Amino acid sequence: MITQIDRLPHQPVSPGKREGLNNASDADLIKTVLAGQVEAFPLLMGRYETMVRKMLWPKLRDESRVDGVFQSAVLKCFVKLDRFRFESSFGTWLTQVAIRRKSA
């Protein structure tokens, strides 16, 4: 399956740099993704996946709906990442996007 993320031009992240990205701040990961190294995006999302899924579960009570809403929120955050203003944490922003996606 080809996703929208797969179609974007990107620069590969070297294995050494990938290890360094594990310890990078959210802001650094966001800047790395925006610079074209989209392979850093899953590291960023992985930090918050469990939290967002746990927030969605009581409201949806269906694993496939939770998956769908989470994936929709991930895609929306990726596409709109350049609009993230660093005024809140990335986790808060992702959670708010997921809540809006749940209601859509």
Image (cartoon, rainbow, N blue to C red):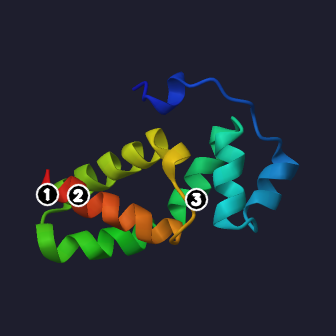
| Mark in front: 3 vs 2 | 2
Q: CA distance from mark 3 to mark 2?
A: 20 Å
Q: CA distance from mark 3 to mark 1?
A: 24 Å
Q: Secondary structure at mark 3?
A: helix
Residue 61 visible in rendering: no
The answer to whether residue 14 is left or right of residue 47 is: right
Question: Circle 2 sits on which residue?
Answer: 100
Helix, strand or loop for disc 1: helix
Query: In the image, what residue type sits under mark 1?
Result: Ser
The answer to whether the residue labelled 1 contacts the one labelled 2, judged by CB atoms less than 8 Å apart, is yes
* Callout 2 secondary element: helix
Residue neighbourhood size for the residue with mark 3, other residues' Cα within 10 Å, grouped as few (<14), some (14–19), many (≥20): many
User: Residue 32: percent from the left, percent from the top?
Assistant: 72, 47
Q: How many marks?
A: 3
Say whether disc 3 or disc 2 marks the residue closer to the N-terminus.
3
Residue 30 placement (x, y as % from top left): 63, 53
The image shows residue 65 at horizontal and vertical percentages of: 17, 55
Three-letter residue code for mark 3: Leu
Res. 44 mark: 3
